[in-house]
Image: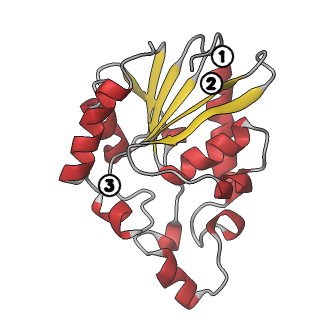
């Protein structure tokens, strides 16, 4: 269902070895797997309907490559504020491994030692939302799971920790938008594969 108002399309990057194994991948540049590349190519058809006045990508290679393989690399603007959560000491470690050393840990509540808190990521998401509100037309964003989840929470006016309630699969498409007017911010679609 399309809208009379601008829509913001969120695309999580394709599969990497670390996303497949559940390792926290913040600032490490892990390449897409063959499956991740194939899923990124399929995004071309899935994103063929709307026109986009802007295409933004995280600086990570996995997001930029997903963007390029989907056919949007030439016009993409790289935005540092779209980077994935900085996991600090938890970079490359699975949640199971973290919980073995720190029982009860939750990313969205506790953040990461030597990395970012949910409030830090929320501040970056707010900057992105400010840019979205100033951009006329549909916008296409390529980034990573935890950042996009915080972005969705902030779009709805929830605290950054609200991102814990949204799940995103690799190469998924979600759409943020409006309902009756530009003051009613909604999620129009979520985690479509």
In which quarter of the view is residue 184 placed? top right
> Percent from the top left, x then y, of residue 142?
43, 36
> Percent from the top left, x then y, of residue 72?
32, 24
In this orientation, which residue lies closer to the viewer: 122 or 35? Answer: 35
> Percent from the top left, x then y, of residue 46?
36, 28
Label number found at residue 131: 2
Quadrant housing the N terminus: top right
Label number found at residue 134: 1
Whether pointer 2 and pointer 3 mark residues with C-beta atoms closer than 8 Å, the reply is no
Q: Earlier in the sequence, mark 3 or mark 1?
A: 3
Q: Earlier in the sequence, mark 2 or mark 3?
A: 3
In this orientation, which residue lies closer to the viewer: 65 or 19? Answer: 19
Q: Is residue 189 above or below residue 8?
A: below
Q: Secondary structure at mark 1?
A: loop
Q: Secondary structure at mark 2?
A: helix
Q: Is residue 167 visible?
A: yes
Q: Is residue 128 above or below residue 85?
A: above
In which quarter of the view is residue 63 placed? top left
For image coordinates 41% across by 68% down, the residue present is 22
Q: Is residue 124 visible?
A: no
Whether pointer 2 and pointer 1 mark residues with C-beta atoms closer than 8 Å, the reply is yes
For image coordinates 40% across by 70% down, the residue present is 92
Q: Secondary structure at mark 3?
A: loop
For image coordinates 49% across by 81% down, the residue present is 96
Label total for image? 3
Q: In 3D space, how far apart are the residues under numbered discs 2 and 1 (Cα atoms)?
A: 5 Å
> Percent from the top left, x then y, of residue 65?
28, 39
Disc 1 crowd rating (10 Å Cα; few below 14, some 14-19, many 20+) is few
Quadrant housing the C terminus: top left
Relative side of 9 to 124, left or right: left
Label number found at residue 29: 3
């Amino acid at each position: 269902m399309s809208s009379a108002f601008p829509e913001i399309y969120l695309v999580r990057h394709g599969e990497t070895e670390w996303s497949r194994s559940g390792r926290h991948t913040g600032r490490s540049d892990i390449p897409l797997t063959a499956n991740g590349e194939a899923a990124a190519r399929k995004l071309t058809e899935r994103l063929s309907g709307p026109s986009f006045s802007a295409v933004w990508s995280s600086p990570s290679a996995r997001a930029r490559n997903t963007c390029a393989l989907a056919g949007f690399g030439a016009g993409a603007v790289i935005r540092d504020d779209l980077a994935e959560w900085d996991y600090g000491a938890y970079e490359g470690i699975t949640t199971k491994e973290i919980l073995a050393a720190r029982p009860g840990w939750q990313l969205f509540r506790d953040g990461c030692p030597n990395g970012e808190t949910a409030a830090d990521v929320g501040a970056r998401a707010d900057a992105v939302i400010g840019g979205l509100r100033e951009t006329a037309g549909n916008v296409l964003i390529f980034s990573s799971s935890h950042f996009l989840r915080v972005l969705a929470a902030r779009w709805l006016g929830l605290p950054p920790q609200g991102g814990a309630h949204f799940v995103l699969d690799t190469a998924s498409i979600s759409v943020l938008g409006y309902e009756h007017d530009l003051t009613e911010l909604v999620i129009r679609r979520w985690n479509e594969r």
